[in-house]
Image (cartoon, helix red, strand yellow):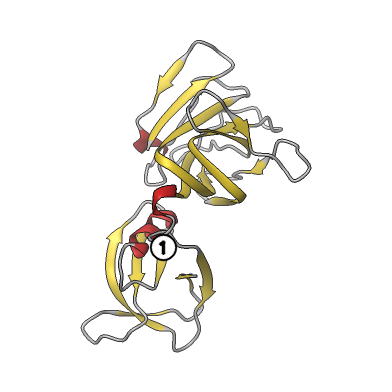
Amino acid sequence: MVFLTMQSQHPPLILIVHYNLARFSSSRAWCPLHGGDGHYLQVELRNVSSLQAIQTRGRGDYPQWVSLYTVNISMDGLTWNSILTSTGDVKVFPGNVDKNTIVTNKLAGNVVAKYIRVISVPDSENRHRSMRLEVEGCPLSLLSNTCHKWEAKLGSTGDVFPVIVDTQASNQGLCGLKCSRQTDCHSFLFDVGSTRCRLLNVSSNSSNVTVNLDGVWYFVKT
């Protein structure tokens, strides 16, 4: 992905930001150069994708966050359309209320794009609105065979699965993609605190470490 920020209230200022600063794994964030309204963070995906969810966090090293935002999408980066409500109004998504909590907004319907803008919306607080961002989705070319919808399941006593892969991941969507590409992966756990992804297999294997899912949410292919 390529992350760009543009200050729409102060044209022609265009600031290119290293994308790592805007990822959840960053201890900092995307930070507009000015206070006020209308700033946005733009993401260019590698492929035209079906977008499923947007996740946001505040600035890791300072109490700044985006509490409300709208979303624009584009296929070419030139022509943009707003995501709308069922009544045709521009949809305003709830954002963050602190600097570290992850807020997930699912995107209803068939949202397909190569570019996405997350645009800050005025709120009652007069401050810089900084943000860390992840976009969940699947390239259209992979939808038929490697991308899956995931259903959250709550573990109960006896739900024990062998761990087949234990690796660093930046978000829940990447965990799902990793599991999709593993033929023997049926479900996965994503630990938000450590950003660690654990891919799970339903079959028992004494050579693998096991985890007890009692009271823990995990994600299963549907």
User: As displayed, is residue 4 above or below residue 68?
Assistant: above
Residue kind at label 1, given as amino acid type: Asp
One can see residue 41 in this view: yes
Residue at 69% x, 33% y: name it.
123
The residue pinned by badge 1 equals 191
Q: x, y percentage for residue 18? A: 34, 30
User: As displayed, is residue 194 above or below residue 44?
Assistant: below
Q: x, y percentage for residue 107? A: 60, 49
Q: Nearer the viewer, residue 79 or 190?
A: 79
Q: Quadrant of residue 26?
A: top left
One can see residue 134 in this view: no
Q: Quadrant of residue 197?
A: bottom left
Residue placed farthest to the left in the image?
207
- Total numbered labels placed on residues in the image: 1
Residue at 58% x, 31% y: name it.
119
Q: Nearer the viewer, residue 35 or 72?
A: 72
Residue at 78% x, 42% y: name it.
87
User: As displayed, is residue 204 above or below residue 136?
Assistant: below
**Label 1 CA crowd tier, 10 Å (few <14, some 14–19, many 20+):** some
Q: Taking 185 as reference, is 192 left or right?
A: right
